[in-house]
Amino acid sequence: MADLKKYQVTEARIIKMENLCGTIYDVTVENEYLAQASRCGQFVHIDCGEQFVLRRPISICEVTDSGIRFIFDVRGKGTKVLSEKQVGDTLDILGPLGNGFTPSDKKSLLLGGGIGVYPLFELAKQTKTCDVALGFRSKDLVTLEDEFKKQCDNLYIATDDGSYGFHGNALQAVKEKLESGAYEAVYACGPLPMLKALKTITDNLGIFCEISMEERMGCGIGACLCCNIKVEDDGEEGFKHLHVCKDGPVFNAKEVQF
Ligand SMILES: Cc1cc2nc3c(=O)[nH]c(=O)nc-3n(C[C@H](O)[C@H](O)[C@H](O)COP(=O)(O)OP(=O)(O)OC[C@H]3O[C@@H](n4cnc5c(N)ncnc54)[C@H](O)[C@@H]3O)c2cc1C
């Protein structure tokens, strides 16, 4: 049962709203509570308007001095309405929610694909020494390249159509280096096939790997069972179900059953 006392709804004022490219929007909101309580890898649940029963989950991209920044792609009706908000408007936000990443002092690899790139930015800022590999569909969708470059030792960009950087996905771009034992910790967010392939590699190497699972989500507080995933369990069945919203979205890759 969800412990409702630990969830906070807050009003946050939009102080920056920028269309980065195509249907990708970069938003910064001002709210002292969010600035203080938010950690890398957590997400917020945003009320996009009265017409929507459910809030929309969006990852925290950066924790700023006065609030948080998030970046989203317009995928359906909720995010379309969100993209029409203006600087000065107020958003009704539930959060921060979820557990977040565990930053490491060890040489790390951060791996992001598509909208999975954005939750890695605050993590990159907090990681002592890391390489970052980011995958996008095509060159026109490459975002945050210069910002990530400042936070890491090496930045690898991959595009599905080969129009910029490595031709393929982010994991393929660094697979050889990863398999050579260059990293002691890996963090990833992106399409399930990429996370699944990554888990096979990091399981074989026996290295620490955290993955953020952006499953379809309903309530965001563990009450509706919409976003459950299978994880390893010592019991008879060998697995149990956990909620992405309450127990995640970040999981140890070793435990996740795809
Ligand atoms: C933990 C988490 C973090 C996320 N972070 C980001 C982010 O940083 N940037 C970003 O662009 N997107 C992110 N997403 C995906 C984003 O939540 C969906 O694209 C968005 O909810 C779509 O809403 P919609 O009304 O536009 O689309 P619709 O398809 O009209 O939505 C209908 C319903 O399905 C749910 N839904 C649809 N697609 C998804 C999805 N992929 N994941 C979860 N719920 C979905 C919606 O929340 C809504 O309840 C995240 C999802 C999760 C679970």
Image (cartoon, rainbow, N blue to C red):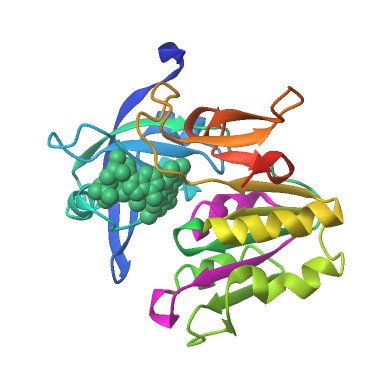
195 up-or-down from 39: above or below: below
- Residue at (85%, 51%) from the top-left corner? 206
Along the horizontal axis of the image, is 169 left or right of 30?
A: right
Q: Position of residue 192 (x, y in %)?
A: 54, 55
Tally the numbered discs. 0
Decide whether residue 137 is among the magenta residues. Answer: yes
**Residue 20 in view, yes or no:** yes
Q: Position of residue 33 (x, y in %)?
A: 42, 28
Along the horizontal axis of the image, is 137 left or right of 122?
A: left
Decide whether residue 108 is among the magenta residues. Answer: no
- Residue at (50%, 31%) from the top-left corner? 36
> Residues in magenta?
117-141
Along the horizontal axis of the image, is 54 left or right of 174?
A: left
87 up-or-down from 226: above or below: below
- Residue at (78%, 74%) from the top-left corner? 176
Q: Nearer the viewer, residue 257 or 131?
A: 257
Q: Nearer the viewer, residue 93 or 213?
A: 213
For residue 10, what is the image quadrant?
A: top left
187 up-or-down from 52: above or below: below
> Furthest-left residue in view?
51
> Furthest-front residue in view?
236
Q: Position of residue 193 (x, y in %)?
A: 57, 60
83 up-or-down from 181: above or below: above
Q: Position of residue 12 (x, y in %)?
A: 29, 36
**Residue 15 in view, yes or no:** no
